[in-house]
């Protein structure tokens, strides 16, 4: 059994859905599945280190025309001796001697082997819905930073548009859904010590939603173009969501997929809720796109 010597090359950042590939490695995985690693893929995998965007759905087609459903796709890593999947990867990205790979999980017993030439296809409608939700998520997070600017009493780290980065400082988790997203922000003691005033926020959630929705609505109406910049084609090369917004060019480090323009979102509704997580207030922001 051989292990891939290089990171998987990925083409989903440019919007690719279909890719011809060579199978480099097949290994047993949990739950009656096998992991299939190829030299290149158009399939977006979930990354256990920041699992915001779920994996694409789709198929791997073999040379004889047989089509295998891909049950999941995860970021995996290998040190040349074993393949580690998802949360079982024992090292951090960039560790010397390790390569990072996209593992496509298919059913056990599938007739797929190292050396096979295959065609990988990500479902277009499912990709589009996740891309729409992810772009809405980033736009709303920047609009939220803008709306909360007046609540900072001390200088704070700033976001890509020069506003205090509430999103980057308080974010606990981010979940991209089809045509929407759910971000959770912890309003804890360290955030308050950093100079963020939480007083009365719970009574202003409707107004906050209107302000954030209006800002994102202006960016949608302006048809702000969105692209993904990347340092290279390898899975671990840094990638950035870049949006040409009316107020300036925004750039956020991001490994996900996106639509090509804010206009493609159609409309974005933003809603807030204040919930309690073991004594810590948590602000939840939901987005829903109308496209
Ligand atoms: Zn992102």
Image (cartoon, rainbow, N blue to C red):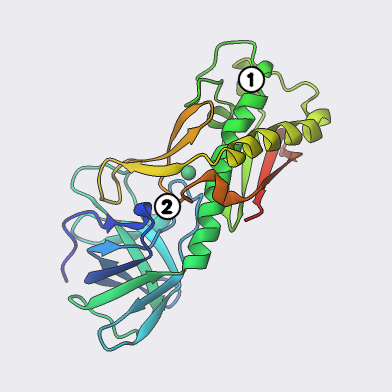
What residue is shown at x 50% (from left), y 58% (from top)?
A: 54
Q: Earlier in the sequence, mark 1 or mark 2?
A: 2
Disc 1 is placed on an element classified as: helix
Residue 118 is situated, as x and y percent measured from the top left of the image, at: 26, 76
Q: Neighbour class for label 1 at 10 Å: few (<14), some, many (≥20)?
A: some
Q: Residue 2 vs residue 131: left or right?
A: left
Disc 2 is placed on an element classified as: loop
Do the residues under discs 1 and 2 have CB atoms within 8 angstroms?
no
What residue is shown at x 59% (from left), y 27% (from top)?
A: 166
Front-lying residue, 271 or 236: 271
Q: Quadrant of residue 169?
A: top right
Q: From what the image shows, is residue 25 above or below residue 274?
A: below
Cα–Cα span, label 1 and label 2: 31 Å
- Residue where numbered disc 2 is placed: 47
Give the label on residue 266, or none. none
Give the label on residue 149, or none. 1
The quadrant of the image that shows the C terminus is bottom right
Residue 67 is situated, as x and y percent measured from the top left of the image, at: 37, 83
Residue 28 appears in the rendering: no
């Amino acid at each position: 059994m051989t292990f891939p010597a290089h990171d998987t090359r990925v083409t989903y950042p440019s919007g690719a859905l279909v890719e011809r590939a060579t199978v480099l490695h097949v290994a047993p995985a949990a739950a009656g599945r096998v992991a299939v690693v190829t030299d290149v893929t158009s399939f977006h995998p979930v990354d256990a280190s920041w699992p915001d965007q779920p994996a694409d759905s789709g198929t791997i087609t073999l040379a004889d025309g047989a089509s295998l459903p891909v049950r999941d796709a995860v970021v995996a890593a290998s040190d040349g001796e074993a393949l580690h999947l998802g949360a079982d990867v024992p090292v951090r990205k960039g560790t010397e001697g390790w390569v990072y790979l996209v593992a496509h999980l298919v059913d056990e017993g599938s007739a797929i082997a190292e050396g096979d030439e295959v065609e990988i296809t990500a479902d277009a409608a499912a990709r589009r819905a996740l891309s729409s939700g992810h772009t809405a998520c980033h736009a709303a997070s920047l609009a939220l930073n803008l709306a909360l600017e007046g609540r900072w009493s001390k200088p704070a780290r700033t976001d890509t548009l020069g506003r205090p980065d509430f999103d980057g400082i308080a974010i606990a988790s981010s979940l991209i859904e089809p045509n929407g997203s759910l971000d959770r922000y912890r309003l804890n003691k360290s955030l308050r010590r950093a100079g963020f005033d939480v007083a009365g926020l719970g009574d202003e959630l409707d107004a906050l939603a209107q302000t954030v929705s209006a800002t994102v609505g202006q960016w949608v109406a302006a048809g702000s173009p969105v692209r993904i910049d990347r340092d290279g084609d390898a899975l671990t090369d840094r990638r950035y969501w870049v949006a040409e917004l009316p107020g300036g060019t925004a750039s956020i480090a991001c490994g996900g997929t996106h639509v090509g323009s804010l206009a493609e979102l159609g409309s974005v509704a933003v809603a807030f809720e204040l919930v309690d997580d073991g004594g810590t207030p948590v602000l939840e922001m939901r987005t829903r796109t109308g496209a």
